[in-house]
Image (spheres, rainbow, N blue to C red):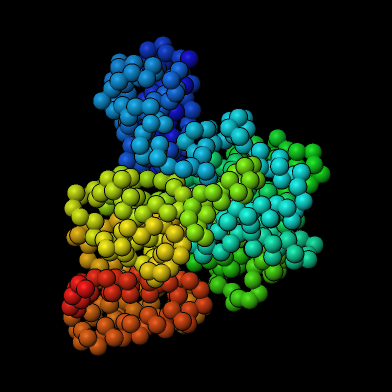
């Protein structure tokens, strides 16, 4: 009996995956063909979704993008045996977009049934936890420290140092909190993990609990991810039934409980202290630091707050060792980064690569250039608060320090491309408008500065007192950079000033002569 895979990932569903799955079931029934239909996660080739795969003796064969009306023709062509069709993509593992990646964190995404614990176990799942259960807490923390893993949520703080702080903080109760409030535009790697391989996140959080002595974990999930909520809860229930969560993990006598809490859709709750306030049932306001959440966190207790990708990277570190993970990457940026490519790009999707790959390789070797066919003029890296980079910087390697040297950030690994029709002054105005809409209102530079920033940008675009307002914009950005309480206000100047510095002609200023 043939096995057919159709993704249940939100992006694939939005492109018609549910209708394609139903069409395959219906066509098979009409033809009297028996098949097993598995709803897997997406491989991250969003330009080919809905991508249907068929298991053959030579491995999986892919077809895409498939629409319901294509299904009868696929059956006629013998796709259940992997035969040729106009939508054939060939052997899945030989598709260059996939073949040239280094998938560590996303190793199972798109391969397994996301809610099948048996499938997870048969693909090396829970090997990291098994090792961790036999280790002392300090040894687990050391393994994570040795791996060089840094927070994938944006701040890039060394994960091992954060864990060690919580380990050494005396308390009768500690917590593990997963920041799944993935709110940056153009990012989706957290969602892909939660929808495509939720057990790897559950395992990572359980290992974190063992490492620091925490017995309770929470996944703070953005409300815009209802599909992820369903899949996470199915996987958590399966883990409880099998003894991978709850009292006496795998009969070890050690416990860890986990539940999902849904946020209300505020961007600022992606900031760790605002997230903790929201998790405690309060308005999502940023807290003053110190004290750090690692010392005084959720309900006043020592708390690890890590992003989804950070925690989902832990199982392979405990399975294969910190050295194995550290062998990928460059400089102080170790391991791999799930890069999310979006915007005006021919082949958008997820590309997990070791640090060191350049923007140009991502944009052209993987992305295939702009969707419009026009030159790519700029990219924004790191979400709506990330800097805009011009074409002259496309050879920059993806590396935390290389980006910092350009006054840019890698953030959560999102890259949004723009062709040469983009108006960068309008993009700078959008950054200010975004901050004004999403500010929690606690500090004046962010709350008032962003609102005044929109007004200043409107005057610049309307060419009213142009030079005076350009100076005022830079002065305002300096105030927000130095005076804001958190990264929302403190980073809004990144897109504004980078747009102004690299594309002054869009602001009505003269473009500097090339050296």
Kindly tell me whether residue 298 is visible in this rendering: no
User: In the image, residue 422 lies at what x, y percent?
Assistant: 22, 62
Taking the view exactly as shown, the residue that stands out farthest to the right is 253
Rendered-image quadrant of the C terminus: bottom left
Q: Residue at x 32, y 41 (%)?
A: 47
Relative placement, left or right, of 381 versus 235 is: left
Taking the view exactly as shown, the residue that stands out farthest to the top is 32
Q: Residue at x 41, y 16 (%)?
A: 29
Q: Please tell me in which quadrant of the rendered image residue 305 appears.
A: bottom right
The front one of 414 and 100 is 100
Q: Where 341 falls versus 117 (above or below)?
A: below
User: In the image, residue 6 lies at what x, y percent?
Assistant: 42, 31
The front one of 97 and 109 is 97
User: In the image, residue 468 lies at what x, y percent?
Assistant: 24, 88
User: In the image, residue 207 lies at what x, y percent?
Assistant: 68, 49
Q: Please tell me in which quadrant of the rendered image residue 252 appears.
A: top right
Q: Residue at x 33, y 18 (%)?
A: 83
Kindly tell me whether residue 62 is visible in this rendering: yes
Q: Residue at x 75, y 44 (%)?
A: 133
- The number of callouts visible is 0
């Amino acid at each position: 009996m043939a096995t057919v895979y159709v993704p249940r990932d939100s992006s694939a569903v939005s492109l018609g995956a549910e209708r394609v799955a139903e069409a395959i079931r219906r066509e098979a029934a009409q033809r009297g063909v028996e098949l097993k239909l598995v709803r897997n996660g997406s491989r991250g080739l969003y330009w080919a979704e809905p991508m249907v795969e068929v298991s053959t003796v030579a491995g999986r064969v892919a077809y895409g993008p498939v629409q319901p009306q294509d299904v009868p023709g696929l059956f006629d062509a013998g796709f259940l045996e992997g035969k040729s069709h106009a939508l054939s993509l060939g052997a899945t593992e030989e598709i260059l977009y996939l073949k040239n990646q280094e998938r560590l964190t996303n190793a199972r995404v798109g391969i397994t049934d996301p809610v099948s614990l048996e499938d997870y176990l048969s693909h090396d799942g829970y090997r990291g936890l098994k090792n961790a259960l036999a280790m002392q807490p300090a040894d687990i923390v050391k393994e994570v420290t040795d791996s060089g893993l840094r927070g994938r949520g944006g701040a890039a703080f060394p994960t091992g140092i954060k864990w060690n702080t919580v380990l050494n903080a005396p308390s009768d109760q500690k917590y593990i909190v997963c920041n799944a409030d993935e709110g940056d535009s153009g990012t989706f790697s957290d969602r892909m993990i939660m929808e495509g391989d939720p057990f790897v996140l559950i395992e990572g959080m359980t290992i974190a609990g063992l490492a620091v002595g925490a017995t309770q974990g929470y996944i703070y999930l953005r409300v815009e991810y209802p599909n992820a909520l369903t899949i996470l809860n199915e996987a958590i229930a399966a883990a409880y039934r099998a003894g991978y969560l709850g009292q006496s993990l795998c009969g070890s006598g050690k416990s860890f409980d986990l539940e999902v809490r849904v946020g209300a859709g505020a961007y600022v709750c992606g900031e760790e202290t605002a997230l903790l306030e929201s998790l405690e049932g309060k308005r999502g306001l940023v807290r003053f630091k110190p004290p750090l959440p690692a010392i005084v966190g959720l309900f006043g207790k020592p708390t690890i707050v890590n992003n989804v990708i950070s925690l989902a990277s832990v199982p392979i570190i405990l399975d294969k060792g910190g050295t194995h993970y550290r062998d990928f990457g460059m400089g102080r940026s170790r391991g791999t980064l799930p890069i999310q490519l979006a915007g005006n790009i021919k082949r958008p999707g997820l590309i997990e690569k070791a640090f060191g790959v350049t923007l140009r390789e991502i944009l052209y070797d993987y992305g295939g250039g702009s969707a419009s066919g026009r030159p790519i003029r700029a990219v924004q890296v790191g979400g709506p608060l990330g800097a805009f980079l011009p074409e002259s910087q496309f050879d920059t390697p993806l590396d935390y320090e290389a980006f910092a040297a350009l006054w840019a950030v890698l953030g959560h690994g999102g890259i949004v491309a723009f062709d040469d029709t983009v108006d960068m002054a309008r993009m700078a105005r959008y950054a200010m408008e975004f901050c004004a809409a999403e500010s929690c209102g606690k500090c004046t530079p962010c709350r008032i500065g962003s609102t005044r920033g929109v007004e200043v940008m409107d005057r610049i675009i309307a060419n009213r007192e142009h030079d005076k307002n350009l100076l005022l914009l830079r002065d305002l950005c300096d105030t927000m950079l130095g005076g804001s309480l958190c990264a929302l206000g403190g980073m809004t100047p990144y897109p504004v000033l980078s747009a102004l510095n690299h594309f002054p002609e869009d602001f009505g200023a003269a473009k500097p002569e090339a050296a």
